[in-house]
Image (cartoon, helix red, strand yellow):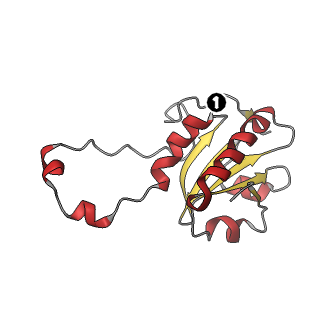
Amino acid sequence: MGKPQVVSDQSFEQDVLKSDTPVLVDFWATWCGPCRMVAPVLEDVANEQGEKLSVAKLDVDANPITAGRFGVRAIPTMILFKNGREADRIVGYLPKPQLMQKLTPHLTMAAPSAAATPTASSTATPKAPPTPPTPPLGGSPTSSTPNAGVGVTKIH
């Protein structure tokens, strides 16, 4: 894909919510130090994930409607949209390995036939229970984001 795509209040519906691929949207502002820290990480992710993931940037100062619509109260906030819905939310700076650890489960698809047909190895080894979903507003005291609140700038 290359560089993250710039989206706006006007283009958000078409570019993000109607996208055929998952889209990671970085809600940011020019004056935000942690936002500048996460920018090169997101460029790397955009370059490496190619067709699996699109990366977009939305300036919260220039596009307050969309930021408000999704309850963005601190930046950087990265929201992963999949099939037009929020699939995950990360508030604050995350180094690339931790960011990819959060994103990867949303980018891989299990083959339907593998789940339908048990094999000798799958019947002998019990499977771990699924990971509970991330709460809708990352950064709360119960958030599953490991460093929620780190590298965060509150929006007034």
Q: Is residue 129 left or right of residue 74?
A: left
> What residue lies at 55% left-to-right and 42% top-to-bottom?
100
Q: How many marks?
A: 1
Q: Is residue 118 left or right of residue 56?
A: left
Q: Is residue 109 above or below residue 28?
A: below
> What residue lies at 68% left-to-right and 57% top-to-bottom?
69
| Camera-side residue of 57 and 53 | 53
| Camera-side residue of 107 and 85 | 107
Q: Is residue 125 visible?
A: yes
State which quadrant residue 127 falls in: top left
Percent across and percent down for residue 40 are 74, 41
Q: Residues within 10 Å of mark 1 (few under 14, many from 20)?
A: many
> What residue lies at 50% left-to-right and 40% top-to-bottom?
101
| Camera-side residue of 73 and 130 | 130
Percent across and percent down for residue 63 are 81, 56
Q: Quadrant of the C terminus?
A: top right
Q: Is residue 75 visible?
A: no
Q: Amino acid at mark 1?
A: Gly
State which quadrant residue 20 falls in: bottom right
Percent across and percent down for residue 137 are 57, 44
Q: Is residue 139 above or below residue 123?
A: above
> What residue lies at 79% left-to-right and 62% top-to-bottom?
8
Q: Which residue is mark 1?
A: 149
State which quadrant residue 152 falls in: top right
| Camera-side residue of 92 and 117 | 117
Label 1: element kind:
loop
